[in-house]
Each structure stands twice: as C-alpha cells, then as structure tokens.
Amino acid sequence: MEVTCPICSKSVPWGPQSEYRPFCSKKCQLIDLGEWASEERTIPAKPAENETPQDIDVEDIEAMLAEQSEDFFKH
C-alpha cells in the first residue's frame, strides 16, 4: 500500500521500510511538526459553549476544598 506525503505529495510505501511514514522524509516530518507547533495546523472542534472566563471567587474555591477535605477524612 502507498500513501501520499501530506507535505510534498510524494508517494510513500506504507511499511517498515518507510521510517517517517506517512511522510517521505525527516524534512517533511519536521515541517509538519513546525506547522502544528505554530498552530498553522489544527484539528477542527466545536467551540466551547461558554468561551468567556467567569470571575473566580477564591473564597468559594477554598470553601469547596475544605468541604472535600472534611468528607475525605470522614470516610
């Protein structure tokens, strides 16, 4: 079976003889990695329902953690 290199479109045999599959070479593999790292490539996803951060109330968080600690040590 052969696949197409996603960077340069060369044909690549799919098997142990192709060390960088699905890429044709280390160069194409590194180009792809760089595109992911710079966020030029992404996986499409549905946006979060609430994209705006909510105010964080430190006292509420501390109360929740204290309650969880009490419940943990009761058992």
Image (cartoon, rainbow, N blue to C red):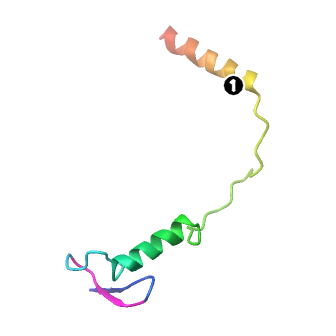
Q: Which residue is mark 1?
A: 61
Q: Position of residue 5 (x, y in %)?
A: 39, 84
User: Magenta segment range?
Assistant: 9-15
Question: Is 62 left, or right, of 18 in this rendering?
Answer: right
Q: Furthest-left residue in view? A: 17
Mark 1: which amino acid?
Answer: Ile
- Left or right, residue 32 beside residue 19: right
Determine if the magenta segment contains residue 11.
Answer: yes
Q: Nearer the viewer, residue 27 or 46?
A: 27
Report the residue at 73% width, 25% height from top: 58
Q: Is residue 19 above or below residue 3?
A: above
Number of numbered discs = 1
Q: Quadrant of residue 63?
A: top right
- The foreground one among 67 and 39 is 39
Q: Is residue 72 above or below residue 6?
A: above
Q: Position of residue 68 (x, y in %)?
A: 58, 19
In the rendered image, residue 62 lying in the magenta stretch gets the answer no
Identified at 53% across, 72% down, the residue is 35
Which SS class for mark 1? helix
Instruction: From the viewer's perspective, tell me whether residue 58 is left or right of residue 2.
Output: right
Q: In percent of the image, x 75 and y 21: which residue is there?
A: 59
Residue at the (56%, 71%) spot, across then down: 41
Q: Is residue 51 left or right of residue 5?
A: right
Quadrant containing the N terminus is bottom left
View extreme (bottom): residue: 10
Q: Position of residue 39 (x, y in %)?
A: 58, 67
Q: Is residue 45 above or below residue 4?
A: above
Looking at the image, the residue that sits furthest to the top is: 74
Q: Could you tell me residue 34's position as x and y percent?
A: 50, 70
Q: Residues within 10 Å of mark 1 (few under 14, many from 20)?
A: few
